[in-house]
Amino acid sequence: MTTTSAPASAPLTRQVSQRVSQSVFDGSRLRVVLLVDVYDGAQQQFLEAYEQLCNQVASVPGHVSDQLCQSIENPSQWLITSEWESAPPFLTWVNSEEHVQMVKPLHNCVRDTRSLRFHVVRETGGPASAADRTLQSAPRMGDGVIRHALTFTVKPGSEETVASILSDYASPDPKVDDTTRLCRTSLFMHGNRVVRAIEVRGDLLAALRHVARQPEVRAVEDAINPYLEQDRDLDDPDSARVFFTRAALPAVHHVTADQDDPKAERLALYYPARAGRGLELAQLLARQDETAADDPNGPVVRSTIFQRDDVVVRLVDVRGGHGADDPALAPKAAELKKLLDTAAAKGSAGPARMALVTDRRSPEA
């Protein structure tokens, strides 16, 4: 989901600007592809669970259609495709507690899943005209980095202990395989909320699984288990799946300015949104960052907006001499006030700056 500022007449393979901008907010239709590996002998159970699930999904706002397909070569391999009016309604649903509960019947019959999300760029055939169905206007060029985050809360009073555990570990091998590499891990805390942001080149799912298998990482995860507000058992696949589903904090917008700054400082700003207004708040911040990145003398080197439900986190690299209170980073107070949960922000009219626990770059990242 990325684009550059290359002129319309430039070849598609030519990138004349370093500017990268990727977003779920461009309004184009979304195609979601879910690859499913079903346990042998559980095909009928899976089909029945899917039929119950699809009847519920059909009533979700923004959902257009879906298909269920079974491999002609391996009956254990299934494919679910769905179409959505745009990315935001899908993300609102897939990141909701409703979705967590809705997919539970699938857990006992599914060995593995892989979800892929695509904006629709072009299509042929079908009765609908281009005027009726919004397509992505142009292909996008990116920087090859996938950004993702996890967030969870720990028991009040345990923050200092948890911060110590999370900062004191040996970094895992950044090389996952010949095509995938860990680039950077940034971990922040505010109160009892933890946010871990990762940057990966290659396959995000392969990177996450690689990290989870590393003994030094597993030791840290086991050490913080007693302090988590949401119980989990990493030896129980179902418990681990539910925990990490709830913890997922997807990137909904990213912008990188044309001019880099190797001395940029990484900040994390936490915006607790009013109930049901998280996606709207993320969109407001995305517009702000796009404007800030257009200014060659402005503070923004790169910024990523992460959002799930009413949790919005802005990870921003700012040039030297700028800080979190730079006016160029602040949306208009009146607009922000409508969307920010000031009670959760402890009366503040703006975001909370999260404390940096650790920020690690892999060699050659």
Image (tube, rainbow, N blue to C red):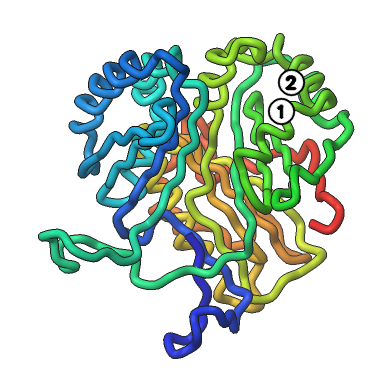
Q: Is residue 171 left or right of residue 125?
A: right
Q: Position of residue 6 (x, y in %)?
A: 51, 82
**For the residue marked with disc 1, what is the amino acid?**
Ala
Marked residue nearer the N-terminal end (2 or 1): 1
Q: Is residue 54 left or right of residue 215?
A: left
Q: Residues within 10 Å of mark 2 (few under 14, many from 20)?
A: some
Q: Position of residue 158 (x, y in %)?
A: 73, 16
Q: Which residue is mark 1?
A: 212
Q: Position of residue 302 (x, y in %)?
A: 64, 62
Q: Is residue 125 above or below residue 9?
A: above
Count numbered badges in the picture: 2
Say the numbered circle drawn on residue 131: none
Q: Is residue 317 above or below residue 184?
A: below
Q: Which residue is mark 2?
A: 221
Please tell me which residue lies in front, 255 or 119: 119
**For the residues bearing labels 2 and 1, Cβ distance under 8 angstroms:** yes
Please report the residue visible at 54 percent of the width from the left and 33 percent of the height from the top: 248
Q: Residues within 10 Å of mark 1 (few under 14, many from 20)?
A: some
Q: Is residue 291 left or right of residue 71?
A: right
Please report the residue visible at 40 percent of the width from the left and 16 percent of the height from the top: 104
Please report the residue visible at 44 percent of the width from the left and 41 percent of the height from the top: 340
Mark 1, secondary structure of its residue: helix
- Rounded to the nearest angstrom, the CA distance separating label 2 from label 1 is 9 Å
Q: Nearer the viewer, mark 2 or mark 1?
A: 1
Tell me where residue 55 sits by quadrant: top left
Please tell me which residue lies in front, 197 or 115: 115
Q: Is residue 207 above or below residue 145?
A: above
